[in-house]
């Protein structure tokens, strides 16, 4: 029998999602903050697909294999944080429902050269009520944008934090997660 | 990708990939006997298996010496998560592995948990 109470000595695994467009640095971010080298697995996710075959108009469930990278940060003997990079291809967005199930929060990584790539992730977390922030991964060191300009470009609500980061830098990437935790605490207190 | 460096290397070739098809190790089954999540925790109970374990079950059990997750076992076996779930659910059925499903709602909505994570992350700076 599996155990299901809190007194069994198992730590709790908590899930954070690292989302954003293809090639924006999600796996780099996960690898930078993880205490283990990023691991890779494939999961079968259920997707609802609108039929284009003879069952026209009938919404059918199908399963698709989605590859994902993840890392780990041990918080204490009781809590372990797992960071999952979401599949970057936009055509997979509908799968995030299952992937995001039970997620504590999310980081949406954005690249100023392709800001629009992160729109689906922003829309998704907003619609699902999952707390998130936007982290602009700066591939060069010159800060050419003000976060207010980026907020306007992304049409972000004022309460969603937007931060600049370097996904390759451990302090910077860890700082993004700290900002996310503060945001989750603040938004929870305001409910 | 660095080598796993242990006895299960012979199932994997860097050039060719996995040397056996994933569902071979689960006897063609595609459903675990027990519902498991990627973040279900697993650990070996220390009890003896009821009989001789096949190599894949033995590998999976070997990865459960300390508490870990289904996702990590799958990644280290280089198997799709669903196949790792089938192996692990067998081990649970045989009493050699214990498991616990994640309880994300209870944890994610608890400010004390968020504070604990915040403090732990700050110490990593």
Image (spheres, coloured by chain):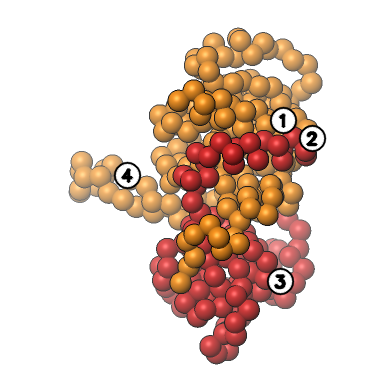
Chain colours: A orange, B red
Q: Earlier in the sequence, mark 2 or mark 3?
A: 3
A10 in relation to B122, above or below: below
- Frontmost of labels 2 and 3 is 2
Q: Are marks 2 and 1 in contact (CB under 8 Å)?
A: yes
What number is the disc on residue A49? 4
List the residue tagged with mark 1. A175
At 63% across and 50% down in the image, what residue appears? A79
Q: Outermost residue, bottom direction?
A: B51
Q: Is residue A3 left or right of residue B46?
A: left
Residue at (73% x, 65% y) in the render: B4
Specify the subunit that label 2 lies on: B
Residue B85, horizontal then vertical, whole percent: 50, 66
| Percent x, y of residue A52 | 26, 43
Please state the horizontal and vertical placement of residue B5, each as a whole percent of the image: 77, 68
Which residue is drawn at the image coordinates 56% and 30% (left, top)?
A184
Q: Name the element at disc 4.
A: strand
What is the CA distance from the residue labelled 4 to the residue labelled 2? Answer: 44 Å
Who comes first in sequence, dot 1 or dot 4?
A: 4
């Amino acid at each position: 029998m599996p155990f299901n109470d809190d007194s069994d000595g198992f730590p709790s695994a908590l899930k954070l999602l690292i989302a954003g467009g293809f090639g924006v640095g999600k796996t780099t971010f996960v690898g930078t903050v993880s205490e283990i080298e990023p691991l890779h697995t494939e999961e079968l996710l259920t997707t609802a697909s609108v039929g284009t075959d003879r069952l026209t108009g009938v919404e059918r469930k199908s399963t698709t294999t989605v590859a994902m990278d993840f890392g780990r940060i041990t918080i204490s003997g009781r809590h372990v944080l797992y960071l999952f990079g979401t599949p970057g291809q936009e055509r997979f967005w509908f799968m995030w429902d299952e992937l995001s199930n039970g997620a504590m929060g999310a980081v949406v990584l954005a690249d100023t050269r392709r800001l629009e790539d992160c729109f689906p992730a922003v829309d998704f977390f907003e619609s699902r009520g999952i707390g998130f922030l936007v982290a602009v991964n700066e591939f060069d060191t010159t800060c050419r944008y003000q976060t207010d300009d980026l907020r306007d470009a992304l049409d972000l609500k004022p309460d969603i934090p937007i931060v600049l980061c370097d996904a390759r830098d451990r302090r910077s990437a860890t700082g993004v997660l700290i900002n996310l935790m503060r945001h989750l605490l603040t938004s929870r207190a305001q409910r | 990708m660095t080598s796993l460096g242990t006895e299960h290397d012979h199932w994997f070739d860097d050039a060719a990939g996995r040397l056996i098809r994933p569902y071979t190790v689960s006897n063609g089954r595609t459903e675990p006997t027990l519902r498991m999540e990627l973040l279900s925790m697993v650990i070996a109970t220390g009890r003896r298996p009821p009989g001789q374990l096949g190599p894949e079950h033995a590998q999976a059990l070997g990865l459960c010496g300390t508490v870990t997750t289904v996702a990590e076992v799958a990644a280290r076996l280089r198997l799709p998560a669903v196949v790792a779930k089938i192996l692990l659910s067998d081990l649970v059925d045989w009493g050699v592995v214990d498991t616990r499903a994640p309880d994300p709602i209870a944890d994610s909505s608890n400010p004390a948990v968020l504070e604990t994570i915040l403090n732990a992350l700050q110490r990593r700076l």
